[in-house]
Image: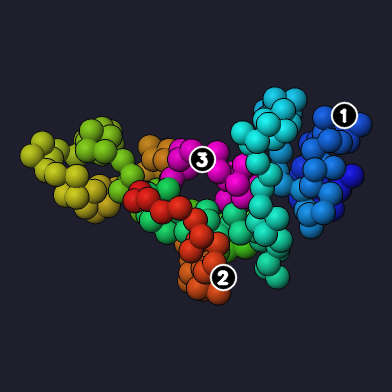
Amino acid sequence: MNTNNIKKQNSHLDLTNEKVQEVLFLYKDYEEVPYISPKRNLEEWLQDVRIGSESLVPKRNMIRYEEDILPGHLILLWRIDFGTFTSISGYPKYFEYNYGINGEQALEELLEKAYARELSATESLQHLNAAQLKAILKQFDIGGFSKLNKTALMELAQEKISEEQLIPFVKVRGYEITPEGKELLVKYPESVDRHPKKKY
């Protein structure tokens, strides 16, 4: 039974559970067992693996780099670099089933390691729509915006409203990768090169 690095992503697993033990056995030759969500139906997944409709996470995706991150972290960094990833973005199934990571935890780790950063309320205005921007301007009794487009609305809000004032009204935050994060993608290009591409 493979328990290598189990506390990093799978501390929630009940090691006395027979289904959990079976999963850990499947990954016995891996450096680390992939993340297994508490919501995953292990009995169903194990059956799907047996009949070939589900497959194991590729072994190469569970080898940590010297920075103590997995290839899946790089995929998340690459995704953030498109500029559309926010605090309400979902995590596709492939993060768990193809890359063996917990997307939310991986984001926290990237932020902690300073490979990505959360944008301020002012910087995150770009992720709001025109109606939301107008609603914020109304809160501060700012007029003259009825014919403005989104870009102009953002500029008006940034000019008239401080960061501290915006914080309670901007619940959605964007993210961007840092120079250190960009260097990491350059250092380890193979994971992104192999990943199926589509526009975001």
Residue at x 52%, y 69% (from the top left corner):
189
Q: Residues within 10 Å of mark 2 (few under 14, many from 20)?
A: few
**Residue at x 37% of width, y 54% of height:** 83
Q: Is residue 7 visible?
A: no
Tell me which label, 3 or 2, sits earlier in the chain. 3
Taking the magenta stretch, the answer to whether it contains residue 93 is: yes
Which three-letter amino acid code belongs to the residue tagged 3?
Pro
Q: Is residue 102 left or right of residue 77?
A: right
Judging from the image, what secondary structure is the residue with disc 3 in? Answer: loop
Q: Which residue is tagged 2?
A: 188
Tell me the distance, in whole angstroms, between the alpha carbons under discs 2 and 1. Answer: 37 Å
- Percent x, y for residue 85? 42, 48
Q: Quadrant of residue 60?
A: bottom right
Badge 2 element: loop
Residue picked out by circle 1: 17
| Residue 92 badge | 3
Label 3 crowding class (10 Å Cα cut-off): few <14, some 14-19, many 20+? few
The amino acid marked with disc number 1 is Asn
Quadrant in the rendering for residue 133: top left
Q: How far is mark 3 from mark 2, CA to CA?
A: 22 Å
Badge 1: few (under 14), some or many (20 or more) residues near its Cα, within 10 Å? few
Magenta residue span: 86-108
Give the Cα separation between the discs numbered 1 and 3.
Answer: 27 Å
Task: Give the mark nearer the N terminus: 1 vs 3.
Answer: 1
Quarter of the figure with residue 61? bottom right
Q: Which mark is residue 9?
A: none
* Closer to us: 87 or 103: 103
Q: Tell me the kind of residue under disc 2.
A: Tyr
User: Residue 166 at what x, y percent from top left?
Assistant: 37, 44
- The N terminus lies in quadrant: top right
Horizontal and vertical percent position of residue 39: 67, 28
